Amino acid sequence: MVYEERENLVREGVLTTTEAMAFLGIKRSTLYQLMEGGILPFVKLGRKRLIPRRALVQLLAKELRGGDR
């Protein structure tokens, strides 16, 4: 990912892991699997991990099923 793409990814803000879990409706272990597996990008500042809001929306859009009629 080039720097400009990374910058655009975080432009809409970031969420904490707790906020991301609530947004996606998943457990902490699932969220960490997504991050460690490289599926969900994140920023680590100190002990805190922050996830771009746009990355969460893109993940959901990619996994969206149905509605093709």
Image (cartoon, helix red, strand yellow):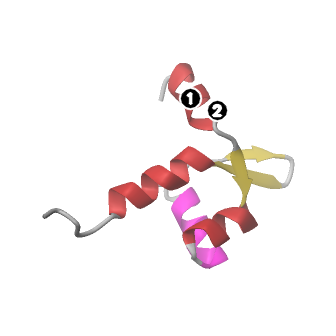
Q: CA distance from mark 2 to mark 1?
A: 5 Å
Residue 69 at x, y percent in the picture: 13, 64
Asked if residue 9 can be seen in this view, the reply is: yes
Q: Amino acid at mark 1?
A: Asn
Dot 1: element? helix
The residue stretch that appears in magenta: 27-36
Q: Could you say where residue 56 lies in the image, as x and y percent from the top left?
A: 53, 55
**Which element type, helix, strand or loop, lies under badge 2?**
loop
Identify the residue at horizontal 61%, vertical 49% (top origin).
Answer: 53
- Give the percent coordinates (x, y) of residue 68: 17, 62
Pinpoint residue 49: horizontal percent, then vertical percent. Answer: 74, 53
Q: Relative to the observer, which residue lies in front, 21 or 34? A: 21
The residue positioned farthest toward the bottom in the image shown:
27
Check if residue 21 falls in the magenta segment: no
Residue in view at x 56 percent, y 68 percent? 24
Query: Disc 1 marks which residue?
Result: 8
Quadrant hosting residue 47: bottom right
Residue at x-position 55% and y-position 67%: 33
In the depicted structure, whether residue 59 falls above or below residue 29: above
Furthest-front residue in this view: 69
Place residue 62 in its image quadrant. Answer: bottom left
Residue 53 lies, with reference to residue 6, above or below; the image says: below
| Type of amino acid under label 2 | Arg
Check disc 2 and report the residue beneath it: 11
In the visual, does 42 lie left or right of 5? right
